[in-house]
Amino acid sequence: MYDSLTLANATLADGSRADIRLQNGVITEISAVSSLSSPQLRSLRELADADLPLGDRLLAATESGIPDIDATGVLVLPALVNGHAHLDKTFVGTGWQPHRVGVGVPARVSAERSIRAGLTAGVPERARALTEEMIRLGTGAVRTHVDIDTELGLSSLHSLLELREETADRLTMQVVAFPQSGILADRGVAGLLDAALADGADVIGGLDPFGYDRDEHAHLDIVFSLAEKHGAGVDIHLHDLGGAAVRQLAQIARRTQSLGLGGRVVVSHGYGLGSIPQEQARRIGSALAAAGVAVMTNGPAGPMPPVLALREEGVVVFSGSDNIRDAWWPYGDGDMLGVARTVAYQSNFRTDEELAVALDMVTDAAATALGLTGYGMRVGAHADLVLLDAAGAAAAVASPPPHRTVLHRGRMVSSTRLVTRSVPLPRPTERSAPSAALAR
């Protein structure tokens, strides 16, 4: 769309104002606001009709050859990062699917298989529909898990690898080979996971080594040996609580440290960290931090990791959407600011500083956990940005704004706005008018 652009007087996440210069898809300068009143400067709000969304005003400016735009009042953030999604599972694009009750992971897996068999839209269509929603809402990078089992084989994986290629100019996507039906419980999955990594999956997944497969040592042996063989990262779903969770977390930390995988291993959900006394969670957090194991939470309704306590121990704690409208969960829309608000709510965050932590969990902390390079609001980073009508970072989390303009590598890939219109109310009829008696 343009080779260079300056967003003048933009608001950054910390509340400061700056001029942000973009050139050839990269942030080349973040400087103090200039006092110059260049005749070329135009306001995003005054350049065109006030009803136009930010993106239309930006497009009008660049098409007019105006390289500098007054972004006064616009919050500019690095693109949002969804650190944990399940694109292959979603029902988005198929119409509403009533939720089927199932207690426990095995029951939910069984219900999912039954529902999946009756869907008319396949993984490519459903995953693509949800991906488009994520991009529209400001997500610039996503880590998606994809089910690998002996019923599906690698079919869903190949669909997501194609989608990754198709959307590469608008979204950075990592794919996790995920054994939703277990590794030991579903014989043959270990070989499929090996093949998935050879075919292009970025990360090897795991699922409740003890709670589901009933043999944490054998499960983790397979996961970490495949990570070592393929030079892949590790991302393990861990729903177990209490002592079982503590034991598995300790093993994951030890294996990560012994293989030198620090910074490349994630424990997703980590419910167990919220089921034990906080001082014990801090001790485990210290071990996870030393090993370089990150923790993902989506702000669940049940026990969740104590975010602030773990961060104080040095753990990288970040967020993802997890399931969005699928057999596991009927909620969600792919909005990572909405996820940040949920995490803040579940954590009882109230101050601006605490709300900033929730935002960090869907931006910089998530990027760190995923090992993204060239990310952030800094010189030399990719110009992957989201522009918002918000007073600041805390406001964006507390009340996610509908107006969003999304840039990927400096190119506008989406612009949204909330459209409202007045609907005249019908005039009262004689029947609906107050009676004379009531009027008196």
Image (cartoon, grey):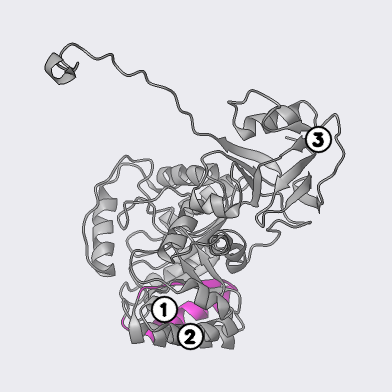
Q: Amino acid at mark 3?
A: Pro
Q: Can residue 226 be seen from the camera position used here? A: no
- Residue numbers of the magenta segment: 214-239
* Residue at point 77%, 47% (across, down): 20
Point out residue 124 in the picture as x, y percentages from the top left corner.
Answer: 44, 46
Say above or below: 79 vs 412: below
Q: Amino acid at mark 1?
A: Leu
Q: Amino acid at mark 2?
A: Ile
Residue 358's tag is: none
Q: Are marks 2 and 1 in contact (CB under 8 Å)?
A: yes
Task: Tell me which label, 2 or 3, sits earlier in the chain.
Answer: 3
Q: Residues within 10 Å of mark 1 (few under 14, many from 20)?
A: many
Residue under circle 3?
67
Residue 273's tag is: 1
Point out residue 128 in the picture as x, y percentages from the top left corner.
Answer: 47, 44
Left or right placement of residue 73 versus residue 69 in this view? left
Please identify the quadrant where the C terminus is shown.
top left
Task: Tell me which label, 2 or 1, sits earlier in the chain.
Answer: 1
Label 2 – label 3 distance at C-alpha: 51 Å
